[in-house]
Image: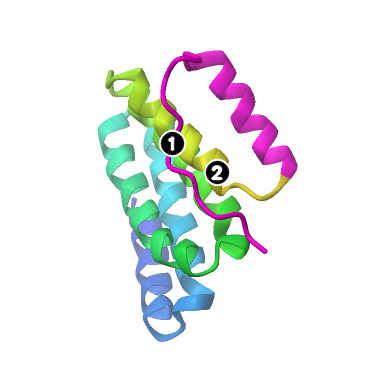
Amino acid sequence: MPLFERAIGIRDRLAQKYPEVYTPVLAMTVNDVAAHYQRYGLYEDGLKWCQTAESLMRSLWDANPGMHGDTIARVMGLKAKLWLQTQRPTNQACAFLREGMTMAIEPGLRRTIQSVIQQFCEESAPPGPQRPSPE
């Protein structure tokens, strides 16, 4: 994974200088690494990378949900997939999906997440945390 490491290193340095611009780019690069691990069946490693991407996006999303909602919602979707692939409880994966649903802005992304929730999650499970809608 030397190319990913190099890309992450470059983006990390840029994110330190210009966090608003490059932290989302860094987070999606890290999320791409998680997806790469998923494709090769390395689910635990992928989950660790995905959690790093989520951590990078949380503060940006908290500060500006309208700008970063779709990005973190995609991260939460991959996190839910990896969670299930590591044989962890479905209810927690559903909580990740529901939280991603509350974060997503783009209607098509919201519909996709809703479809996955309907397919895999029990209706009786409690919803994820509610977030204020962007203005």
Say what amino acid the circle numbered 1 marks: Gly
Above or below 69: residue 119: above
Q: Position of residue 50 (x, y in %)?
A: 37, 45
Colour scheme of the picture: rainbow
The residue nearer to you, when weighing 121 against 11, is: 121
Name the residue at 30% across, 31% down: 42
Residue 104 or residue 36, whichever sits in front: 104
Pointer 1 with pointer 2, Cβ within 8 A: yes
Is residue 40 in view? no
Label 1: how many residues lie within 10 Å, few (<14), some (14-19) or many (20+)?
some
Question: Which stretch did the figure color magenta?
Answer: 107-135
* 45 is higher (above) or lower (below) than 72: above
- Hey, which residue is sitting farthest bottom in the picture? 17
Q: Is residue 113 magenta?
A: yes
Among the 4 quarters of the image, the one containing residue 53: bottom left
Judge the density around disc 2: few (<14), some (14-19), many (≥20) Cα neighbours within 10 Å.
Answer: many
Q: In percent of the image, x 55 and y 43: which residue is there?
A: 102
The residue labelled by disc 2 is 102
**Where is the C terminus found, in terms of image quarters?**
bottom right
Residue type, mark 2 in image: Thr
Badge 1 marks a residue whose secondary structure is loop
Q: Is residue 39 above or below residue 132?
A: above
Label 1 belongs to which residue? Answer: 128
- Left or right of 44 on screen, residue 111: right
* Residue 133, picture quadrant: bottom right
Q: Mark 1 or mark 2, which has the lower sequence index?
A: 2
Which residue lies at the image location 34% right of the left edge and 57% below the top edge? 55
